[in-house]
Amino acid sequence: MSDSTTDHTALPVVLDVWCDLQCPDCRTALEDQRALRERYGDRLEVRLRHFPLEKNKHAYAAAQAAEEALAQGEGRAYAEAVLARVEDLSTKGETFLLEVARELGLDDEEFDTALIDGRHLLIVDADQAEGKALGVTGTPTYMIGGERLDGGKSQEGLRARIEEIADRLLAEGRRTRPGRQ
């Protein structure tokens, strides 16, 4: 749907972050994401995209749980809480996902139902498929202004590179596509 009266220059620059919620490197990347949100405010939209890695047994369920948290209005808080304790996710699995939901005051029974009925499978699968099509092979991986930045090997210098690209896009008045929230 397109509204020709919309001022598209008001759209934020989009930073997609492909993430595995059981990945310690994704936890490390949280600080950079917080700093970027603080620096750019509404001019940068940081979007979590799911890329559960096969080696992480509970990552797929965690991605589904994060989508349920988003449906209940606490997507970012939930993802950050899970990432902050990746070791607990590794040892406790789905029990831990429900525990985090309770800690955030979310409906843990609805979480349990969502994990059983798979209502968020398509979103997780679509994110992963899009990531693969864009060349994502590990996490975290960033996409901004059509450029892919791989953070799985090292986070060093990534925030500076993202800032450089965001600054350029903002100066040009060019934005990346709005896409899924």
Image: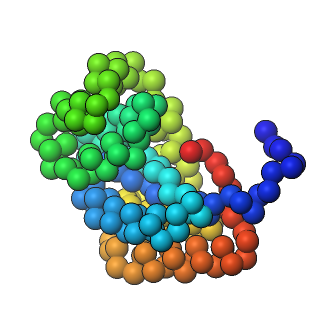
Task: Using the rendered view, name the quadrant where residue 65 is placed.
Answer: top left
85 left or right of 158? left
How many labels sit on residues?
A: 0
Q: Residue furthest left?
A: 91
Quadrant occupied by the N terminus = top right
Rendered residue at 51%/76% (across/down): 163
**43 lies above or below 71:** below
Q: Position of residue 164 (x, y in %)?
A: 55, 80
Rendered residue at 66%/52% (across/down): 178
Q: Position of residue 50 (x, y in %)?
A: 43, 46
Task: Using the rendered view, name the quadrant where residue 146 is placed.
Answer: bottom right
Viewer-side residue, 27 vs 130:
27
1 left or right of 124? right
Viewer-side residue, 135 vs 18:
18
Could one spot residue 53 in this view of the protein? no
Viewer-side residue, 53 vs 97:
97
**73 lies above or below 163:** above
Q: Position of residue 91 (x, y in %)?
A: 12, 41
Q: Residue furthest right?
A: 4
Task: Using the rendered view, name the quadrant where residue 109 is placed.
Answer: top left
Could one spot residue 122 in this view of the protein? yes
**143 lies above or below 74:** below
102 left or right of 53? left
Image coloring type: rainbow
Rendered residue at 62%/68% (across/down): 145
Quadrant occupied by the C terminus = top right
Q: Position of residue 72 (x, y in %)?
A: 42, 30
**144 lies above or below 120:** below
Rendered residue at 39%/63% (across/down): 34
